[in-house]
Image (spheres, rainbow, N blue to C red):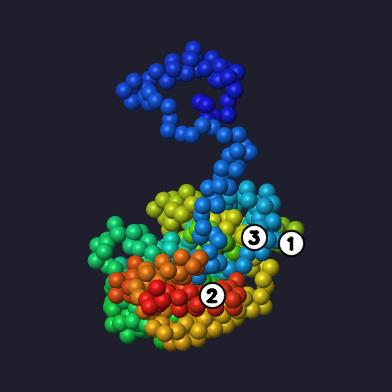
């Protein structure tokens, strides 16, 4: 009881209410053989000032926060305005966890409505829900939705999809009819691009959906319009997944390419990386009655009250806690309310022009870095296809060795792709954002040069 905020007098009052003379008597129903008879393995308690000092000392041991980072692969270090952080500290935002009831406060509902509007415009599809956990669970829900709509079981997962997203889809569908027998994995091309011919060959009359990364996990941007037409001709649904939606400021949105469902990770649009989480899932689909009925999560709609004033209401809630379980489309229980609010605040601060300008900065800096790395001895840009802010590069030593040498120089140089595919053990995936200065980019290039095998 020493770790609970109860005084001796409060404990005595509770014991009297329970009719017990002591704590030992209160817990005498617990068998003696399972009771802990030694002190807990915990350090002595600290007062607030000493505790805060101890936490700062622990934090100082984490050198990653002081390193120059080019990590990406689904979590990106874009600028997050201090003003947005201050707005999130308003109690009406950070205490409003999620809208469970249709009569929830108008401020929360309007924020979600604005979020849906932003998602719809970015993904180029007219219907967007009130957010989901992250991109991986959004994708899994999209695949389940496609199965319900088509009454088919087969799923074609392209190698251009983030491998962890693909694993989440497999986890969601493993125990469904025939499980793994219905997964068709199509490897990405050697340059990391979406292999359109291989995907087309994998289509058949049992295919429920085709899932592609846009841009691909390896950073490339493929033309998908023709593929979408072939998917539809086979009676399947076309699903795209985007890791950094800032790319969609410069390339055509999924809806314009024929995507039936588009999902994305919203972290880049409104949340600092925070060592990998939390994220916020973006989910949008075509305007179709059947699709709307199968959409997971919830939707906030705009309406007029009896006085003709604009208002907002929770118009769709398809999770099993809201409706009959057999009619539910998802058991996801929240819309990641605070994260969606953070995204909405930042995107409203950026505006459409700022959204495009930020993306242009990422692209120009990525091109500069690609030119510099491509000129380095023993290095090669794996794909010469269009890219946005991620590059797959081939290095002269194993990727793990090169990244270790960069880390010794205070640089987190990217992701070792050998961890995902042993055939790519000499490849590194790195990401560039608007936060990287030219000096940062030049420092990475110099670090790669210093990491050459003959540089020891």
Residue nearer the viewer, 340 or 100 = 340
Question: What residue is disc 1 on?
Answer: 308
Residue 405 in view here:
yes
- Position of 198 with respect to 61 (left or right) is left
- Front residue of 317 and 196: 196
- Where does the image place residue 184, in percent across and percent down from the top left? 29, 72
Q: CA distance from mark 3 to mark 1?
A: 20 Å
Q: Residue at x 47, y 49 (%)?
A: 321
Q: CA distance from mark 3 to mark 2?
A: 41 Å
Sequence-first disc among 3 and 1: 3
Looking at the image, which residue sits at the far front? 456
Task: Give the quarter of the image for residue 348.
Answer: bottom right
Circle 1/circle 2 CB separation < 8 Å: no
Sequence order check, earlier mark of 3 and 2: 3
Q: Give the foreground label among 3 and 1.
A: 3
Instruction: Verify CB contact (< 8 Å) between mark 3 and mark 1.
Output: no
Q: Where is residue 361 shown, x and y percent of the image? A: 60, 79
Mark 3 highlights which residue? 111
């Amino acid at each position: 009881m020493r770790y609970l905020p109860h005084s001796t007098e409060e404990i005595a009052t509770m014991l009297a209410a329970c009719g017990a003379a002591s704590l030992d008597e209160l817990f005498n129903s617990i068998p003696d053989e399972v009771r802990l008879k030694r002190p807990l393995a915990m350090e002595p308690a600290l007062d607030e000032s000493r505790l805060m000092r101890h936490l700062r000392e622990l934090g100082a041991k984490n050198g990653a926060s002081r390193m120059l980072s080019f990590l990406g692969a689904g979590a990106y270090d874009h600028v997050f305005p201090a003003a947005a952080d201050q707005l999130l500290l308003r109690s009406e935002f950070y205490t409003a966890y999620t809208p469970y009831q249709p009569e929830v406060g108008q401020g929360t509902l309007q924020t979600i409505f604005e979020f849906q509007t932003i998602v719809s415009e970015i993904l180029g599809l007219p219907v967007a829900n009130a957010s989901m956990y992250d991109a991986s669970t959004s994708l899994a829900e999209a695949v389940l939705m496609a199965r319900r709509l088509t009454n088919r079981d087969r799923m074609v997962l392209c190698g251009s999809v983030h491998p962890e997203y693909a694993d989440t889809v497999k986890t969601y569908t493993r125990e469904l009819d025939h499980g793994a027998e219905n997964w068709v994995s199509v490897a990405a091309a050697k340059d990391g691009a979406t292999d359109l011919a291989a995907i087309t060959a994998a289509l058949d009359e049992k295919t429920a959906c085709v899932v592609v990364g846009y841009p691909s996990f390896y950073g490339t941007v493929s033309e998908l319009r023709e593929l979408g037409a072939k998917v539809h001709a086979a009676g399947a649904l076309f699903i795209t997944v985007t890791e950094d939606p800032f790319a969609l400021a410069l390339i055509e949105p999924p809806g314009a390419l024929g995507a039936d469902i588009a999902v994305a990770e919203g972290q880049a649009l409104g949340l600092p990386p925070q060592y990998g989480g939390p994220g916020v899932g973006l989910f949008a689909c075509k305007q179709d009655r059947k699709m709307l009925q199968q959409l997971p999560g919830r939707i906030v709609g705009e309406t007029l009250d009896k006085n003709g004033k604009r208002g907002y209401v929770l118009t769709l809630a398809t999770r099993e806690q809201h409706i009959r379980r057999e009619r539910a489309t998802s058991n996801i229980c929240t819309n990641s309310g605070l994260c969606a609010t953070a995204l909405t605040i930042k995107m409203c601060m950026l505006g459409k022009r700022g959204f495009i300008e930020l993306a242009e900065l990422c692209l120009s800096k990525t091109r500069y870095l690609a030119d510099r790395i491509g000129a380095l001895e023993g290095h090669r840009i794996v794909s010469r296809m269009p890219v946005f802010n991620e590059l797959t590069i081939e290095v002269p030593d194993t990727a793990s060795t090169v990244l270790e040498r960069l880390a010794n120089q205070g640089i987190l140089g990217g992701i070792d792709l050998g961890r995902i595919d042993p055939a790519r053990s000499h490849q590194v995936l790195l990401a560039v954002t608007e936060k990287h200065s030219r000096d940062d980019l030049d420092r990475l290039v110099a670090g790669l040069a210093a990491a050459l095998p003959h540089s020891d």
